[in-house]
Every structure is written in structure tokens, then in C-alpha cells.
Image (cartoon, grey):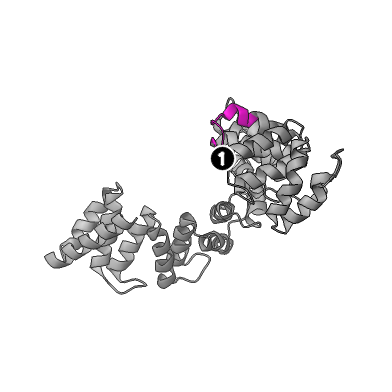
Amino acid sequence: MQTIRKISLFLVLIGSGQAWGGFYEGFAHYEQGNYDQALLEFMPLAEGGNAFAQLYLGIMYEKGYGVPQSDREAVKWWQLSAEQGGAVAQYNLGGMYARGQGVRRDDREAVKWYRMAANSGLADAQYYLGVMYAEGRGIEQNLDVAAYWYRKAAEQGDARAQLSLGILYDEGRGVAQDYNLAASWYRKAAEQGEPLAQYNLGGLYANGQGVAQDYAQAANWYRKAADQGDALAQYNLGILYDEGQGVPQDDMLAVKWYRRAAEQGFADAQYNLAIMYHGGMGVSQDDIQAYKWLSIVVAGGNKDALTGRDAIAQSMTAAQVENAQRLAREWLKNH
């Protein structure tokens, strides 16, 4: 959970009912990174009860901007601002209680402050309140209510909430299962660059759930997530190239994507990469590499790979097996 670092002056001042005093000048210094000068303006205002100066002073302490970094001081100033109804301070304070940062962790307090900010319409707070309900943290688990708060945030464009709401519709938890709505919410989040939404949307296209089956579209969304490092997307993109579904069949590209997922520890990709090395598909035939990757899979708990590895070993010299085992040990040590 992240605190809100930057707020437009319009959002800060609208409906405040508080005297501007030196706040505008302090805010201008803050925006320009002149934190020493911002502190000189904010501190007397905050001590005098200005909720927005208290909010920004808390941000400065949390980030160490112009002051020694102090989570406790951040909590102190956000508490004062939150008690005056400052939604952003309420959200930030909820996050500190949820993480146990600058204060003893207390999920009930986190829910309390998130709820106040959520009721004020703050999308970040609505999303995290949904998370608390979904996980049963600080409050009884209730996926119906989680879906309600996710939707509130999702309708404001929050990609995390759109993804979370899509998952609930995809799995039929807290809402009636509806692949059409799952695809709709995944798409909104995916178009904002959310990698898991991109992967999930690709999966719906691959399976024809909520959308017409379209492997080309599946590859398109898998690729977007894979480029962001999503191992599942990399693995599934590798399969599409391996089988020539939605993309031209290409063993070299299959190996490329299997390797990326394998290097992240994804066992199925490691297994497939071993098969590609053993068969010399998209890569030079190399049983040492095949044995290495199968050994890594076995070390991860997949005993089925043991049979394949031992079969490959039958055509290897003792020196080659020893080399492959060494490579596997080195990989496991580094990962």
C-alpha cells in the first residue's frame, strides 16, 4: 500500500473552509522540491490546526523530505488531519495501521480509517477497504461487500479494483459468475497496463470465455503481460509459439518465452525448456541443459520429471551428468 504523494492544489483546497494562510506558498515550495521552505510554511499552520498543512507535513516525514524520516511523526500529523475529516490523511493513516508502520499493526483501525476515506469517495481507500473485506482482515470476510467497494473504485478508473472485480466475476465469488463482465473489467485494467489483467484477459480469449475464442488476441494480451515480466504470460506465450496458435509456429520464440519464465522459477516452463533442449527444437540439441532444467524441476518437488531426467542420463557420459548437476546446483543457489 502506498501513501498518496502528490495532490493537486484544487483537490486540497476545494471545500476546505480553512484559511489559506501560508498554505499556498508552502504548497508551491513543496511542488518545486524546496522542502526546507515548505516546512517553514507548513509547520506553524499544522500546529495551528490546518488539516492540509498537517497532511503534507505527514507526507514529508514519511518520505524524509526536508525532515528526518519518521513514520511516527507521519502518523502523528495524519492522525490530526484525519480527525478533522481529511480523506487523504484518513487513507494514509489506514495504510500505516495495515502495515504496522509507525504504529502497532491494527487491522481494525486500518478498516476504520479506510472506511472514512472510502465514504468520502477516495478510490484508493475504496480499493483497500475492498481488500480488507476480501481477506477478512480487521473485519469478517465478506466478498459481497468487497465487490461493492471494488466496484466503487473501479468505476473511478482504479486498475487494481478493476482487476479484482474482474477476478470475482471470473470465479463467481461475491457475485454471480459472469465471464462477460470479467472480460469487461479485465479489459479496462489491461488497457491501463495492469499485467495480471492482461494475462487473465488473454486466458479468456484462449478459452473463449466471455469473448469469442481468438488465439491471436490471446497472444496479444499475453505478450503485453509477458513484456512486463509476468511468468505465466511468458509460459503461455511460449506454448502458443510452440503450437502455432494465434501466431506462426516458431520454436525459437517458444524457447525464448519458456526461458524467461523458467528463469523466474516457473516449473512448467523449465520442464518445457528441457524438452526443447533434448529435442533440439529452437535451440541446439544439448542434453546437459536438458538434464540441468529437469534437475531444477525435480528439486522444486516435481517427481514426475525424475523419470525423464534419468532417461536422458542414459545417453550421457558421467562427466556430462556431473556438469549438468553442477549447473543445476549453481542455478538453484542463485535463485
Q: Is residue 162 above or below residue 225?
A: above
Q: Percent position (x, y) of residue 147?
A: 65, 36
Residue in the foreground of this view, choosing between 109 and 37: 37
Mark 1 Cα-neighbour bin, 10 Å: few <14, some 14–19, many ≥20? some
Residue tagged 1? 171
Q: Is residue 41 above or below residue 116?
A: below
Q: Percent position (x, y) of residue 174?
A: 61, 33
Q: How many dots with numbers?
A: 1
Q: Residue 282, located in which quarter of the rendered image? A: bottom left
Q: Is residue 274 left or right of residue 180?
A: left
Is 297 colored magenta in this rendering? no
Dot 1: element: helix
Question: Split into 4 quadrants, where in the image is the C terminus?
Answer: bottom left
Q: Percent position (x, y) of residue 92?
A: 65, 39
Q: Is residue 172 left or right of residue 328?
A: right
Q: Percent position (x, y) of residue 57?
A: 69, 44
Q: Residue furthest top?
A: 140
Residue in the foreground of this view, choosing between 253 and 13: 13
Residue at image position (30%, 67%) is 277
Tell me which segment is drawn in magenta: 100-111
Q: Is residue 90 above or below residue 209?
A: above
Residue in the foreground of this view, choosing between 235 and 326: 326
Amino acid type at mark 1: Glu
Residue at image position (35%, 63%) is 273
Question: Split into 4 quadrants, where in the image is the N terminus?
Answer: top right
